[in-house]
Amino acid sequence: MQDVCLKDVFMLFIIYSVFGWLMEVTLVSIRNKKLTPRGFLIGPWCPIYGWGGILIYLLLEKYHNDPIALFVMSFLIGSIVEYFTSYIMEKLFHARWWDYSDHKYNINGRISLETSLGFGALGTIAVYFVNPLIIDLLNKIPSHIFLIMNIVIAILFITDSIISLKLVSSIKNAKFQKFKDSTQKVDELVKEKLKETKLGKRLVNAFPNLKIKIDEIKKEIKEIK
């Protein structure tokens, strides 16, 4: 096992976020037979994979000599990260960004056996093959260049996060005075509101199964009436 300094953690986070984005775009585009953007953010990164990658590296390298334990722990970590990411985002934005309810084995539609098995396989591959390669490459970058790379990428990532959060906040801030108390209508209206901007349209395309949680919206409409 190679040691990772704290200065490397952010770069690992970004690399795994980009890897995850590329994987999702590739798989979904093949399934849809057209280029399909993915991810909550505007840029080519999915932070959920970044967090998962870091946790797997920091916590699971000790299972390097036990592939079965490594697979099981990767399965669990990936499932936990995905479940709580779904839960937190739903509470923040009153929307379900992905839903596995149509999968045979799932928990509250937030995680499914199929995707969790994928996390187990990806975690195992990461520990045995990807991590050593990434760390070796990072160690070859001159320290001053590496520092500049971190600063530039951090600025881009933070800017992207701020813009994306501001965009998605329109889900909570949308007004529905002219519409009936209808789940389907409200859901359609929010998606149309998001499509009013180019970035919003990209977000809706990235999450075609986006489901708006309208309990609070219904309450607001009743108060207006």
Image (tube, helix red, strand yellow):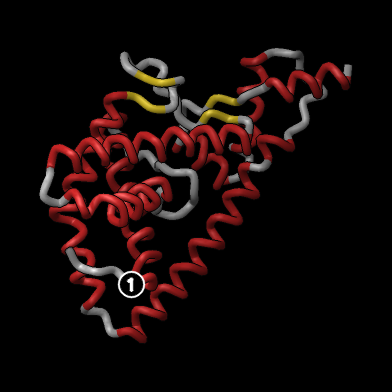
Please identify the quarter of the rendering in which residue 104 is found.
top left
Q: Judge left or right: residue 99 versus residue 123.
A: right
Q: Residues within 10 Å of mark 1 (few under 14, many from 20)?
A: few
Q: Position of residue 37 (x, y in %)?
A: 40, 42
Please give the name of the residue rendered at 62% of the width and 15% of the height, measured from the top-left corner: 184
Query: Is 19 on the left or on the right of 187, as rendered?
Result: left
Which percent across, then down, holds residue 51? 39, 51
Q: What quarter of the picture does the C terminus occupy?
A: top right
**What's the residue at 44%, 33% (across, down)?**
83
Q: Which residue is mark 1?
A: 5
Q: Position of residue 155 (x, y in %)?
A: 51, 69
Q: Is residue 130 above or below residue 117?
A: below
Quarter of the image containing the N terminus? bottom left
Instruction: Tell which of 160 and 136 is nearer to you.
Output: 136
Q: Residue flagged by tag 1: what amino acid is it?
A: Cys
* Percent x, y of residue 110: 44, 27
